Amino acid sequence: MPAKGNVRRIGVLTGGGDCPGLNAVIRGVTKPAEDYGMTVYGILDGFEGLVEGRAKELHNADVSGILSQGGTILGSSNKGDPFHWPVENNGKVEIEDRSADVVKNYNAWNLDALIAIGGDGTMHICNKLCGLGLNIIGVPKTIDNDLEATDVTFGHDSAVYVVTEALDRLHTTASSHHRVIVVEVMGRYAGWIALHGGLAGGADIILIPEIPFSWESVFKKIHERELMGKRFSLVCVAEGARPEGGDIVITEKDKKRTDPIRLGGIGKVVADKIEEGTGRETRVTVLGHLQRGGSPTPFDRILSTKFGAFAIELAAEKKFCRMVALKGNEIKNVKIEDAIARQKLVRQDNQALIAARRVGISFGD
């Protein structure tokens, strides 16, 4: 639905899981909008609000002071895919297509464009909405950092900071008690959090989804450290990591989600196997949603603000069905369909991975 004349009414929503930096983007969108003569409507609870018709007008005062706040003032949801909408009938969950309600509410609010802040799932929904004729601008958010079209997504740096601090703290207690401590971090299909957090936090072993690991290699690394007089080890494992010939560990399946698989538990599996295979006392810490909470790092605050302000610029220029992206030190824009063409995974030639191997970190392969 091409905007006629100047773009005047903008919707903004935060889809998928929350993370630090969302509020900074909302602020980065809302404040410059006034200079363009635009009105901003904050859509509540992600795509759920877009389907159900829940939104509120945002003013400068509404976003004042939220730069440092984690989470999102608009609310979010990872179960609100309008093309995969769960409805309970007689105790059974059925899936419906509610995209027509999205178009209806978009038109009812007289929106000229919608800025959707989210990760891979959100961008796939955005691409489908573009196909329905809506004017969409995407802003890449995901702690997993798995969107290929941007050098980094906001939220990732903040998550890595949490992992790094946790490993720093666990290092002293592992050393004091001569234990192996396993830290389970997020990372369903991409191991960026485990790689960067483990590298920054001095992990001895990093296990990621892209590199199936051998139990014997893990045991060998721990024994090698002991021969060097190091009577403790830190293992950083992504939730999607799996042993060679094995499967990922699934906590549950939720039909209401577009991706129904919920991961979790690999940390305990690894800890139990290490204790059994080496005889060393082993403990496990699952960071879970700690990685999503709290204030954004300075890097994420700056990146989020740049992303938000650039999204408004794209809207004013009527460059729709585009996603903002960090390329080097500059903010660019790419087609949403290109942004989701493939997932950004850790490759063997990644410089961080190569550096980790050179300083003696094992990946269990």
Image: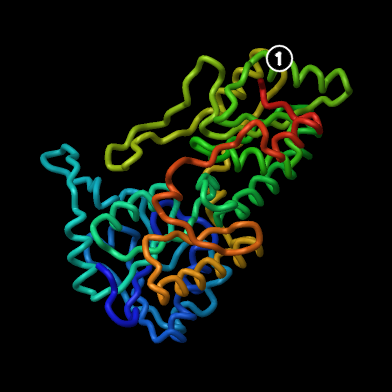
Tell me where residue 118 sits by quadrant. Answer: bottom left
Disc 1 target residue: 278
Location of residue 86 with respect to 58 vertically, above or below: above
Location of residue 228 with respect to 76 vertically, above or below: above
- The quarter in which the N terminus is drawn is bottom left
Left or right of 180? Residue 327 is left
Left or right of 60? Residue 203 is right
Identify residue type, mark 1. Answer: Thr
Pick the residue in front: 172 or 20.
20
> For mark 1, does the 10 Å Cα neighbourhood hold few (<14), some (14 to 19), or many (20 or more) residues?
some
Q: Give the residue at x 24% y 48%.
A: 83
Q: Give the residue at x 49% y 61%.
A: 333
Left or right of 245? Residue 196 is right
Of all residues, the one furthest to the right in this rendering is 229
Expressed as whole percent of the image width and height from the top left, the position of residue 154 reads: 56, 57
Expressed as whole percent of the image width and height from the top left, the position of residue 139 reads: 46, 60
Q: Give the residue at x 45% y 59%.
A: 323
